[in-house]
Image: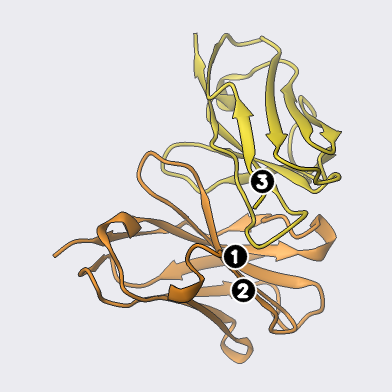
Amino acid sequence: QITLKESGPTLVKPTQTLTLTCTFSGFSLSTSGVGVGWIRQPPGKALEWLALIYWNDDKRYSPSLKSRLTITKDTSKNQVVLTMTNMDPVDTATYYCAHSPYTLAFAFDIWGQGTMVTVSS
Amino acid sequence: DIQLTQSPSFLSASVGDRVTITCRASQGISSYLAWYQQKPGKAPKLLIYAASTLQSGVPSRFSGSGSGTEFTLTISSLQPEDFATYYCQQLNSYPPLTFGGGTKVEIK
């Protein structure tokens, strides 16, 4: 059974750096054809894809946020970490991580519960 | 970037109704489209991938069709648990992996 869970601060100040950790079980990010992505959703708004990391350490970022994002993986800990610099109130959102397998054309089949991050001074 | 336009953005329907949601891509994406269902306060749930393949465990009243630039999600007989917001997502050309703006299905 695949599970993912996001963790990190619930409140960050403007200009600070946000670090979110996705801890997963039931799969290995060293297995060929597997990816983990990050998606966010501001309150009452649509989903926005942020970044994705693959088993081979290939990384993809949203072009509009690329300069602020870094995604890394720690295969031994079964974790994926997303950092976002220079946080702004418009970055207030629920942040999700999700499993993305090649077998499903890299659609996000299993999602974490999400973690709400508020950016405010 | 590939833009996805969902229509309608809001839909009011009754239990038992047949419901169709459309997702149009700004350029061709072959069949690299997924549909998700999201209920308030919950994470999205994958319903369909590769435009028409039903994800394991998803009721057969859900179906997807289309290729290229026009796609549809159909619920053959709306059930009370289907009232939710639905999103399409393209996986053909990225970054970015684009989501549509969502379609909220509410009870009439």
Residue holding disc 2: A25
| Chain letter of the yellow region | B
Identify which residue is drawn at 62% across, 59% down. Answer: B96
Judge the density around disc 3: few (<14), some (14-19), many (≥20) Cα neighbours within 10 Å.
many
Q: Colour of chain A?
A: orange
Which residue does the image show at 49% across and 14% down from the upper left? Answer: B107
State left or right for residue A47 relative to residue A12: right
Say which quarter of the image contains residue A71: bottom right
Q: Which mark is residue B105?
A: none
How far apart are the two marked residues, 1 and 2, measured between alpha carbons? 5 Å
- Foreground label between 2 and 3: 3
Q: Amino acid at mark 2?
A: Ser
Q: Would you say residue A1 is visible in this rendering?
A: no
Query: How far from the left and from the top, in percent, is residue A53?
Result: 64, 75
Asked if the residue under mark 2 is in contact with the one under mark 1, i.e. CB atoms within 8 Å, the reply is yes
Looking at the image, which is closer to me, B66 or A118?
B66
The one nearer the camera, B34 or A59, is: A59
Observer-nearest residue: A48 or B83?
Answer: A48
Q: Residue at x 69, y 26 (%)?
A: B22
